């Protein structure tokens, strides 16, 4: 589904991603782990076209998207759940979702209000509340639901569990597992290791703009040294 090949990304003169490669097979959940500031969000920005890499290539289903504008990449079926809940504060829950609706190309069951309301009962209850009247957890749910309204085939999620109460984290985990069941490929950037491992097929660990480890999620618990060194766990 997605192939990131040796990308190098800068903010002005700041050299951030220093040769990152990663693969997301169709229907798989792939996690990117790492401490604050290692370049996880920059990786997502590089894929979606907000901060295109200066070198290297990004391929979506074999098609090069490296220097396409962000709106074209979105239209090819890439959805984004940005870090920090960027929703429209003055629009209601329903309106936030309506502005994000995009028709599905090809088959599959599209995401529309009815499906969102069934998957996120909390958003159904709050459908007429404005964005700025929602709790942090509700805003995070809305950010995820809004990305789904674009009917993506690849979903990039930047720390979706950040700041959620345990019950909502579990709820979100069920939704992600369900999306995977329906064949969506997901890139999950997370600081919550148990959450990420429970959902992922494959794991990448970043440090200082580079991938320092990758392997099957099921085997990650064995790598105590990597966990201690790069994630500060154990
Ligand atoms: N717009 C920007 N201009 C300049 N430097 C930036 C910009 N955004 C991020 N950086 C720097 O790039 C590096 C990587 O940042 P990035 O946001 O990708 O990290 P991250 O792994 O997502 O961190 P976090 O876990 O805190 O979200 C950091 O050193 C950060 O200070
Ligand atoms: Mg980040």
Image (cartoon, rainbow, N blue to C red):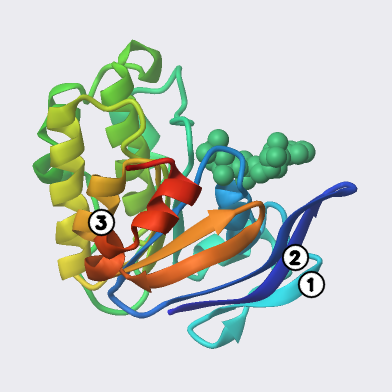
In 3D space, how far apart are the residues under numbered discs 1 and 2 (Cα atoms)?
5 Å
Spatial CA span between label 1 and label 3: 31 Å
- Residue at 19%, 21% (x, y): give it: 126
Residue holding disc 1:
55
Is residue 71 visible in the rendered image? The answer is no
- Badges 1 and 2: C-beta atoms under 8 Å apart? yes
Residue 18, visible in the rendered structure: yes
Which label is found at residue 197? 3
Residue under label 2: 8
Q: Which one is in front in this view, the residue at disc 3 or the one at disc 2?
A: 3
Whichever of labels 1 and 3 marks the residue nearer the N terminus, that label is 1
* Picture coordinates of residue 117, whole percent (x, y): 14, 40
Which quarter of the rendering shows the N terminus?
A: bottom left
Residue 210 as seen in the image, left or right of residue 175 = right
- Mark 1 or mark 3, whichever is nearer to me: 3
Q: Give x and y (percent) for residue 156.
A: 44, 56
Residues at discs 3 and 2 in contact (Cβ within 8 Å): no
């Amino acid at each position: 589904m997605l192939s990131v090949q040796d990308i190098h990304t800068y903010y002005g003169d700041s050299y951030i991603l220093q040769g990152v490669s990663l693969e997301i097979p169709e229907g798989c959940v792939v996690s990117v782990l790492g401490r604050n500031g290692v370049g996880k969000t920059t990786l997502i920005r590089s894929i979606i076209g907000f901060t295109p890499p200066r070198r290297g290539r990004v391929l979506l289903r074999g098609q090069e998207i490296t220097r396409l504008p962000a709106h074209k990449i979105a239209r090819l079926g890439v959805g984004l759940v940005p870090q920090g809940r960027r929703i429209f504060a003055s629009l209601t829950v329903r309106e936030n979702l309506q502005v994000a609706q995009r028709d599905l190309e090809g088959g599959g069951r599209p995401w529309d209000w009815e499906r969102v309301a069934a998957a996120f009962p909390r958003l159904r209850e709050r459908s007429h509340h404005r964005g700025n009247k929602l709790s942090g957890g509700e805003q995070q749910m809305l950010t995820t639901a809004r990305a789904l309204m674009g009917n993506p085939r690849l979903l990039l999620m930047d720390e979706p569990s950040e700041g959620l109460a345990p019950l909502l984290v579990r709820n979100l985990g069920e939704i992600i597992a369900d999306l995977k069941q329906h064949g969506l490929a997901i890139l999950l950037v997370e600081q919550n290791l148990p959450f990420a491992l429970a959902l992922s097929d494959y794991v990448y660990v970043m440090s200082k703009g580079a991938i320092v480890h990758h392997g099957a999620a099921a085997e990650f618990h064995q790598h105590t040294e990597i966990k201690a060194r790069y994630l500060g766990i154990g």
